[in-house]
Image (tube, grey):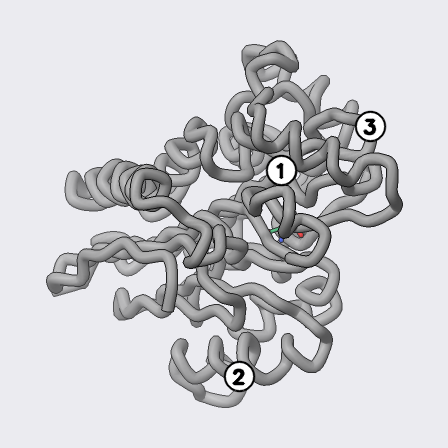
Amino acid sequence: MQKISIAIHGGAGTILKEEITPAVEQAYLQGLREAIAQGYAVLENGGSAVEAVKTAVAVLEDNILFNAGRGSVFTKEGMHEMDAAIMEGKNLGAGAVAGVRNIRNPINLAFAVMQHSEHVLLSGKGANDFAVKEGFAIEQDEYFFSQFRYDQWQQMKDGDRYSLDHNSSPANIASEKKFGTVGAVACDVNGDMAAATSTGGMTNKNYGRIGDSPLIGIGTYANNKTCAISCTGHGEPFIKAVAAYDVSCLVEYKGMSLQEAMNEVVNNKLPKLQGEGGMIGVDAAGNISLLFNSAGMYRGAKSSEGTDFVSIYR
Ligand code: ASP
């Protein structure tokens, strides 16, 4: 029988273990559990992998703790510019948006691009105009305000530094590099796979900066022949490494297992490019893999063969 499975991440930039309070740790773990529960419920009810990943990512986008949707970080200009992508492995259907503003669930907009447009990637004003045409509600800036991200941005905004950091204490902002993004991969009852990724990007990023997350084959990729992958980490090295597609290629052309291929990219290729971060993947047999070269990665997985966990650190 086909194994159904889902894996999620909430970013490879975690609060350092020595800084996290038990209450905050529980809040993150609970957020991950909710996303898994809702995504897995779709699969359990016979729903498609693409519906499952869209559902799980939207739950994380609605949770202010994660750097995507509502909890997105501030750009250098004090705005929120969000990127998201979704891909279906069965037909290589793909949709993505970059630099969108005031959209509650960018992953739903990426899905609409896939379903209702001739395009794969829409950016900026064009993406926002498409959202309006599609009937998406536009949120006010206040919806995306969170005090701790605002404080982080205040610490950085007068300098040229940008950071993937989304939740370190002010004392550590200057020295730590952290990440924030959410993503999901799934394999459904038909053996179809899908991947979805959504992010607010990096604190104090230049306006117009686009990371790896919305780029098909880089932060997000799904192909029924090989695997589905969602990445998190320092976007620029991931772009240079063509990270997600490289995993797929290693599976397709080198015959590696998903785990071997992800290990090669996360622990060998990316470090050579100073590519700190991680990724989650699933293959056609429903096998799940979650790997990172950073201090931690908010993550979790559930399958019909008994996998069921959420975790932050190693
Ligand atoms: N990869 C994302 C970006 O560079 C950030 C992250 O995953 O935390 O925008």
Mark 2 or mark 1: name the one nearer the start of the chain. 1
Give the Cα separation between the discs numbered 2 and 3: 37 Å
**Residue at the extreme front of the image, as rendered:** 171
User: x and y percent of residue 306 in the render?
Assistant: 12, 62
- Secondary element type, mark 1: loop
Badge 1 residue CB within 8 Å of ligand 1: yes
| Residue depicted at x 53% and y 83% | 264
Give the Cα separation between the discs numbered 1 and 3: 14 Å
Give the Cα separation between the discs numbered 2 and 1: 27 Å
Asked whether the residues under the numbered discs 2 and 3 touch, taking CB atoms below 8 Å apart as contact, a structural biologist would say no
User: Can residue 115 be seen in this snapshot?
Assistant: no
User: Can residue 179 be seen in this snapshot?
Assistant: yes
Quadrant where the N terminus is found in the figure: bottom left
User: x and y percent of residue 175 in the render?
Assistant: 69, 58
In the foreground, 43 or 158: 158
Query: Would you call the spot at circle 2 few (<14 residues within 10 Å), some (14-19), or many (20 or more)?
Result: some
Q: Amino acid at mark 3?
A: Glu
Badge 2 residue CB within 8 Å of ligand 1: no
Asked whether the residues under the numbered discs 1 and 3 touch, taking CB atoms below 8 Å apart as contact, a structural biologist would say no
Give me the disc on residue 77. 3
| Residue depicted at x 64% and y 78% | 271
Residue 285 lies left or right of residue 294; in this view the side is: left
| Residue depicted at x 59% and y 74% | 246
- The residue that label 2 is drawn on is 264
- Secondary element type, mark 2: helix
The quarter of the displayed image where residue 257 is located? bottom left
Mark 2 or mark 3: name the one nearer the start of the chain. 3
Mark 1 or mark 3: name the one nearer the start of the chain. 3
**Residue at the extreme bottom of the image, as rendered:** 254
Q: Amino acid at mark 1?
A: Gly
